[in-house]
Amino acid sequence: MSVRIGTRGSALALTQTQQTAELLSAVGGFATELVRIKTEGDVRTGSLAQLGGTGVFVAALREALLAHRCDVAIHSLKDLPTAGTPGLALGAIPRRADARDVLCARDGLTLAQLPAGAQVGTGSPRRAAQLRAARPDLEVVDIRGNVDTRLGRVPGLPGNAADAPGDLDAVVLAAAGLERLGRTGVVSEYFEPDVMLPAPGQGALAVECRVEDAPLRENGVPVAGAVQGVLAQALAAIDDADTRLAVGAERALLARLEAGCAAPVGAFARRKGSLLYLTAVVCSVDGAKSLRVERATDGLTEVGAHLLGIELAEELLAQGAADFADLGSGEGYEA
């Protein structure tokens, strides 16, 4: 048996897909084959908001799954729209990597050490708004491109080509991507959640499959002893229950806010003992206004996590988040 795994062709996508393929192969005892799929987001230029959000990185992979050109597809979970696709299921969410954002700056500078007027690059309205809130004297520059392209905008970072533009003082990236690529040496500062909340699902991977290949679950928990195929059993084995709860709460909040890719929304959930905590922030694009709330639940089930996300979203809306942020017009994904 060989399982075909759909992936985008970027260095980060290939790396995280290969790592997941090795996990599946180890527990399932089958061979794997990577199938590269070119997505709309890989071809078109312009900001992600203009392209319609990070869903442009997902549609082609989902089409390949439905057409049986691959058996599973690997996504960065923060790229996955909250709305599902008929015929497909979220087969596994492996243990989450570091969910934090990081600063990669010239000369190893931290955010506090950057001089007034320093240029910091990011393609995320969420990161941009929180940067402006923390340092309104910085100039935030909208950028796109893969990890190396973005790092090449900062002079002096390890591994940058001599002909890289080096026109920015710093860029903000996801810690998880750099960790998977073995590039954490470029990090000058890790942002704790009290400074910058990550995107819902950041640091986690989604293993999507066809419904007939998905593990049988009851309230998010694999059914013990259920008769299932080899692929379904392997997917159940690499699924991490705490990660699924956390990202379920975050994505439920995003869906209830109907926050599109232009809405600066951050969320981070984590389990501590018998409670699941969820913290969320909604900012204006310029970072001048923001609302931050936190709640916890002892309902450590898929339903309980979902309700926590909805309740926190309702609290944000009741406090007027929609008055200064672009809510109610998106599909629940973020750049």
Image: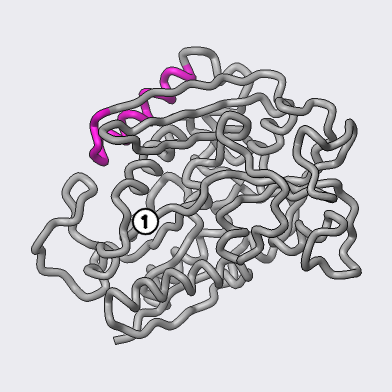
Question: Image check: 289 left or right of 138?
Answer: left
Is the residue marked by circle 1 packed among few (<14), some (14-19), or many (20+) residues within 10 Å?
many
Can you give x and y, in whole percent of width and height, for residue 231 in the image?
A: 26, 73
Q: Is residue 309 magenta?
A: yes
Which quarter shows the N terminus? bottom left
Can you give x and y, in whole percent of width and height, for residue 20 in the image?
A: 43, 69
In the picture of the structure, the residue carrying the numbered disc 1 is 93
Q: Is residue 215 magenta?
A: no
Specify the farthest residue to the top.
Answer: 319
Instruction: State the predominant SS element of the stretch in magenta.
Output: helix
Number of numbered tags placed on the structure image = 1
Q: Which residues are magenta?
A: 298-317
Considering only vertical position in the picture, is 160 above or below 203? Answer: below
Q: Is residue 49 visible?
A: no
Q: Quadrant of residue 36?
A: bottom right
- The structure's colour scheme is one colour
Considering only vertical position in the picture, is 77 above or below 197? Answer: below
Can you give x and y, in whole percent of width and height, for residue 299 in the image?
A: 23, 32
Residue depicted at x 38% and y 50%: 84
User: Foreground: 224 or 4?
Assistant: 224
Residue depicted at x 80% and y 59%: 157
Q: Is residue 318 visible?
A: yes
Residue depicted at x 23% and y 66%: 212
Can you give x and y, in whole percent of width and height, for residue 221 in the image?
A: 20, 50
Question: Image check: 188 left or right of 21?
Answer: right
Question: Image check: 260 left or right of 64?
Answer: right
Q: Amino acid at mark 1?
A: Ile
User: Foreground: 138 or 58?
Assistant: 138
Residue depicted at x 61% and y 46%: 335
